[in-house]
Image (cartoon, rainbow, N blue to C red):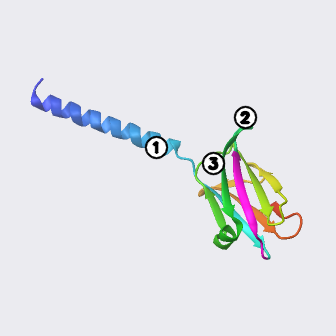
């Protein structure tokens, strides 16, 4: 092989590897899930979010300071897929726990920017509920 064929083969291999890498990363990235929070009154306590896999097992749990996330107004999850459910647990400073499960199509919606939902948290019963925009 002459030098020109070797250089052409290297360029072709590099181009092919680049196209495969870009294509794989483009298809494997899921859009984020944005949970918009509506906090009524002076809410205090902790909020945890548990991602539930289609087989019913927990993927991971994240804990949040309710006052910080209410001030921010939203929580984002980068690893959400529509087959998964999200279980929120709100624990006011009184020691009780209130749980709610959100699923795609009922509580979680999607648009061109990704997935979204609205969660309402209050300091009076029912304390935590799915809400609509």
Label 2, on which residue? 55
Crowding near the residue tagged with mark 1, few <14, some 14–19, many ≥20 C-alpha atoms within 10 Å:
few
Frontmost of labels 3 and 1 is 3
The magenta segment is 42-51
Residues marked 2 and 1 touching at CB (< 8 Å): no
Distance from the alpha carbon under mark 3 to that under mark 2: 15 Å
Looking at the picture, how far across and down is residue 121, in whole percent? 79, 66
> Where the N terminus falls, by quadrant?
top left
Label 1, on which residue? 25
Residue at (12, 32) in percent of width and height: 4
Most extreme residue toward the right is 125
Mark 1 residue element? helix
Q: Earlier in the sequence, mark 3 or mark 2?
A: 2
Mark 2 residue element? loop
Looking at the picture, how far across and down is residue 45, in whole percent? 75, 66
Q: Nearer the viewer, residue 36 or 23?
A: 36
> Where the C terminus falls, by quadrant?
bottom right
Frontmost of labels 2 and 1 is 2
Can residue 133 be seen here? The reply is no
Q: Main secondary structure of the magenta part?
A: strand
């Amino acid at each position: 092989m002459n030098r020109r064929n070797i250089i052409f083969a290297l360029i072709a291999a590099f181009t092919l590897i680049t196209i495969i890498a870009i294509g794989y990363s483009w298809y494997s990235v899921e859009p984020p899930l944005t949970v918009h929070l509506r906090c009524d009154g002076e809410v205090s306590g902790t909020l945890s979010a548990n991602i539930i896999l289609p087989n019913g097992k927990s993927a991971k749990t994240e804990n949040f300071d309710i006052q910080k996330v209410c001030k921010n107004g939203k929580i984002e999850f980068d690893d959400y897929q529509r087959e998964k459910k999200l279980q929120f647990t709100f624990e006011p400073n009184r020691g009780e726990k209130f749980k709610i499960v959100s699923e795609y199509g009922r509580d979680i919606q999607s648009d061109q920017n990704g997935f979204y939902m609205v969660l309402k948290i209050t300091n009076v019963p029912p304390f935590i509920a799915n809400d609509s925009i």
